[in-house]
Image: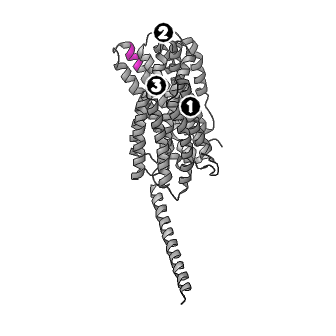
Amino acid sequence: MSGHLIRERRGDVVRLLQKQADEAGGRVTTNRVASLLRRRESPQRPTFLELFFDLVFVFALTRIVHELVLDYTRGHVAERLTTSLAENGETLLLFLAVWWIWTQTAWVTSRFDPFQPAIQFVVLATMYGSLLLAVAISGALADTGLLFASTYGAIQVGRTLFFALIVRGHNLRRVNTLALVWFGTSAVPWLTGAFAPEATRNSLWTLALAIDYLGARIGWPVPRLGRSRASPWSGAGEHLAERYWQLVIVALGETILTSGSSLLRGPIVPERTMALTVSFLITVLLWRIYFYRAGQILGEAIAASADPGRVGRLAELAHLLMVAGILAASAGSELTLIDPTGDAKPAWVGAILGGPALFLAGRSLFEYVAFARVSRPRPIGIFVLVAMAPVMVGRPPLVVALAAVAVLLGVAVSDTIRAHGRPLEQPSPPR
């Protein structure tokens, strides 16, 4: 056999061995990635790790409410509702950042198996970062702005980069690569804003949040790489539905924590005890209105939808509005506890009545997600709360809070009357 033929045969053997090695490596990579993914047939209930993760957000939401109360109690701000809304806009920026961290983490645990050590590491690292983020909230608009912005960027960029590296050979790598470009882009205005004056900082941080939210909404498009059309709601609607239920419970729990702590910061007299009772009633009514039927079948509604991604996005927006309303109501409860029998300033009335109104707006959208319709008591309740606001200025905050209770009670009672003697309504999401 000639030397040339021997070399050819040897080359063929080397190429065959290399091909077999590549195929084996590919199978190993595929199996490794598959072991990290949440299986469709596995239980979709949230895990204890996810519940543990939510504990940090009790603290984070408490800090958001604290900032809202500061907005409402500044002398010149409390007297004018428009100025108060401007102050609230700054706090809203912080809330939206915290909300987006939580939402992205919920998406992670809907795609990946939380029992895998690598996924647990990511969730716990995000949990620690979220704790730092919550600590930085109180001074984020001043001396801790750099801590807030750098922590937010580190969580989003670091987590996305981690998944882009460990899911090689799977289509989720492309999704994370696209998202990484957008998070890296938004990190620039986040960090730049931390060193800028107040007005510039607010504009830059608003731009950064717009990049993050818009990127997710349109599929993280990148030139030459395209965009992602995958929606976490398509394959894990039941899991995500329960995660959002739990976030509502966290927000409601924050109202109890805040109102109880507020009572302890002053004399425990009958007026303040009554204010605590009214705060508790508002919390119970918000819980009752949320979970009434639509709140129990979100997962089923998404599964029954022809477009789970669209319905899921509407559900996200509905929960964003409801949680924001709960936090505003919590701030209103604390204001009531501060001075239950004084004169309610315009900004205080805006919080005490506006929180429940915003919650009902989100709950109306939530009902549309489940049943493709909105029952009349919810928009009527919003109208009554808004119409009462001018009349309530100057009245005792406790009276204003009792008016909010009356409206919420009317909505809850109407739900009970409408459901009495009828079979449970089945989900019929919008087409």
Q: Quadrant of residue 429?
A: top right
Toward the front, the furthest residue is 3
Query: With 351 as the anchor, is 215 left or right in this view?
Result: right
CA–CA distance between discs 3 and 2?
Answer: 31 Å
Mark 3: few/some/many CA within 10 Å (<14, 14-19, 20+): some
Q: Is residue 272 magenta?
A: yes
Q: Three-letter amino acid code at disc 2?
A: Asp
Residue 381 visible, this angle:
yes
Q: Which residue is at a point 52% across and 29% down the rendered structure image?
A: 93
Q: Please determine whether, in this image, residue 413 is positioned above or below residue 350.
A: below
Q: Which residue is at a point 54% across and 37% down the rendered structure image?
A: 188
Residue highlighted by disc 3: 142
Q: Is residue 151 magenta?
A: no
Q: Please determine whether, in this image, residue 388 is positioned above or below residue 154.
A: above
Where are the magenta residues, as a range? Answer: 271-276
Q: Which residue is at a point 61% across and 31% down the rendered structure image?
A: 375
Q: How many marks?
A: 3
Residue 261 percent location from the top left of the image: 36, 23
Label 2's element? loop
Residue highlighted by disc 1: 204
Quadrant of the image containing the C terminus: top right
Mark 1: few/some/many CA within 10 Å (<14, 14-19, 20+): many
Q: Three-letter amino acid code at disc 3?
A: Ala
Residue 248 percent location from the top left of the image: 47, 34
Label 1's element? helix
Disc nearer the start of the sequence (3/2): 3
Q: Three-letter amino acid code at disc 1?
A: Leu
Residue 410 visible, this angle:
no
Residue highlighted by disc 2: 343
